[in-house]
Amino acid sequence: MATEERVLCFQRKLLEELGVFQGLSLEVERYLPVVTSASQILYLNRSDAEQDKRYKQLIPYVLILCHDKILRYRRGKGGQETRLHGLYSVGIGGHISEEDHGLFSNHLGYHEGMRRELLEEVAIAEANEAAVAVINDDSTEVGFVHFGVVHVMCVANEAVVGRRSGIVAPEFVPLTEAVKDQSGYESWSRFCLEHLELLISKAAELGVKIPERMSAGALR
């Protein structure tokens, strides 16, 4: 019998102490070091974590940019989160399992865990990235038990291949096209697309090498 996946969580009361917000916050430096601290994390069976509102599951959410385009895909039926099936997404990533526990001795542990999860989702060449925001959406059942960390990652070419059945028809689309009609996107992607210029600007401030034509205002 297969062992149930145990996923990385932190207690919701920790978020309440730091300050609950709705939507996207650029104050990643305020939240991320605390919620990834070795003294704060714990692992729960995923089936329990999805129902227990006392906890938040920590989810890396990586926006992959190439020149003036962003990677977009549809959530397929192969993804475990059935509440998101069929929706567009611009965020790659997912739950971090207990198998990564040894990585969480310090802040770099989250970073390595994020990269491992990213490589499980898509085949991608070496890239530069930074954590630029956090997401909390208590307005939905799925959002209430998850907490997202938004990363901006730039890649040199579009040779990115989906590795899981939950990622359907991944393709790079122009930023201007991605932000036009956001009705078909999952909520976290809408938050990111609504603030995309700010996210790109912050990534540049944190050392991500943003292509010149993107930093010059690719959304205008």
Image (cartoon, rainbow, N blue to C red):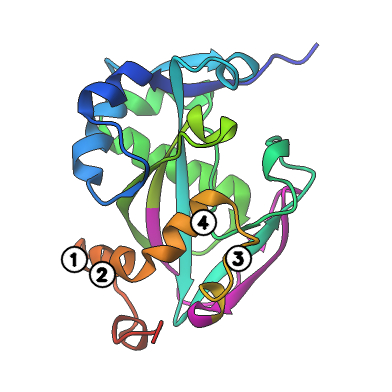
Q: Is residue 206 above or below residue 20?
A: below
Q: Can the viewer see residue 114? A: yes
Which amino acid, mark 3?
A: Arg
Label 4 residue SS: helix
Q: Can the viewer see residue 127? A: no
Which residue position is annotated with label 1?
A: 205
Pointer 2 or 4: first along the chain: 4
* Gap in angstroms between the C-alphas marked 4 and 1: 22 Å
Pointer 2 or 3: first along the chain: 3
* Gap in angstroms between the C-alphas marked 3 and 1: 24 Å
Which amino acid, mark 4?
A: Ser
Which residue position is annotated with label 2?
A: 201
Determine which of the numbered discs, if any, sits on residue 189 in the image.
Answer: 4
Q: Magenta part of the protein: which range?
A: 151-176
Label 1 residue SS: helix
Q: Is residue 124 above or below residue 118?
A: below
Pointer 4 or 3: first along the chain: 3
Pointer 4 or 1: first along the chain: 4
**Are discs 1 and 2 less than 8 Å apart at CB?**
yes
